[in-house]
Image: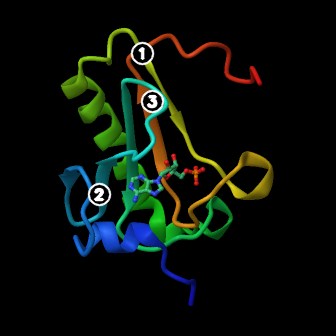
Amino acid sequence: MAEETIFSKIIRREIPSDIIYQDDLVTAFRDISPQAPTHVLIVPNVLIPTVNDVTADHELALGRLFTVAAKIAKEEGIAEDGYRLIMNCNRHSGQEVFHIHMHLVGGRPLGPLLAK
Ligand code: AMP
């Protein structure tokens, strides 16, 4: 059984956060340390620590991440200019919270993907 992170508490609304969307499968909330004018995290309600732990059972929830990302991008007014969806996995990516999450980042030009 994987250890819960702060994201489980956010999903259950046990701690404050800026939740902008929630349904039976996913929750979306604003990143506490935004890297762009729009920086939203979209997470499956079920705890999956990393992308390495994904199974076919998760396909519905993970597909929903994209549906919700597209909806939020439109609502935020960034769909036409564009945005970036990021999922980090483990050490080399810099993953900090081990409950998989999609970063939806936009509202300014983001530069080349692999620029460091
Ligand atoms: P990652 O490096 O992909 O694991 O990203 C973790 C993200 O979670 C970072 O962008 C953090 O700023 C964000 N984060 C951590 N704690 C919170 C929180 N309580 N509410 C919202 N975002 C958070």
Point out which mark residue 105 bears: 3
How far from the left and from the top, in percent, is residue 80? Answer: 33, 10
Give the residue type at disc 3.
Val
Please, is residue 113 above or below residue 55 in the view? Answer: above
Residue 108 lies, with reference to residue 51, above or below; the image says above
Q: Is residue 12 left or right of residue 106?
A: left
Marks 3 and 2, the one that precedes in the sequence: 2
Residue at numbered disc 2 = 27
Dot 1 amino acid type = Gly
Disc 3, SS:
strand
Q: Which of the 4 image quadrants contains residue 12?
A: bottom left
Q: Residue at x 31, y 59 (%)?
A: 26
Crowding at dot 2, Cα within 10 Å, few <14 / some 14-19 / many 20+, comes out as many
**On screen, 96 above or below 31?**
below
| Residue bearing the label numbered 1 | 82
In terms of depth relative to the viewer, which is nearer, 85 or 10?
Answer: 10
Q: Nearer the viewer, mark 1 or mark 3?
A: 3
Residue at image location 35% in from the left, 68% down from the top: 45
Q: Which mark is residue 103?
A: none
Residue type, mark 2 in image: Thr
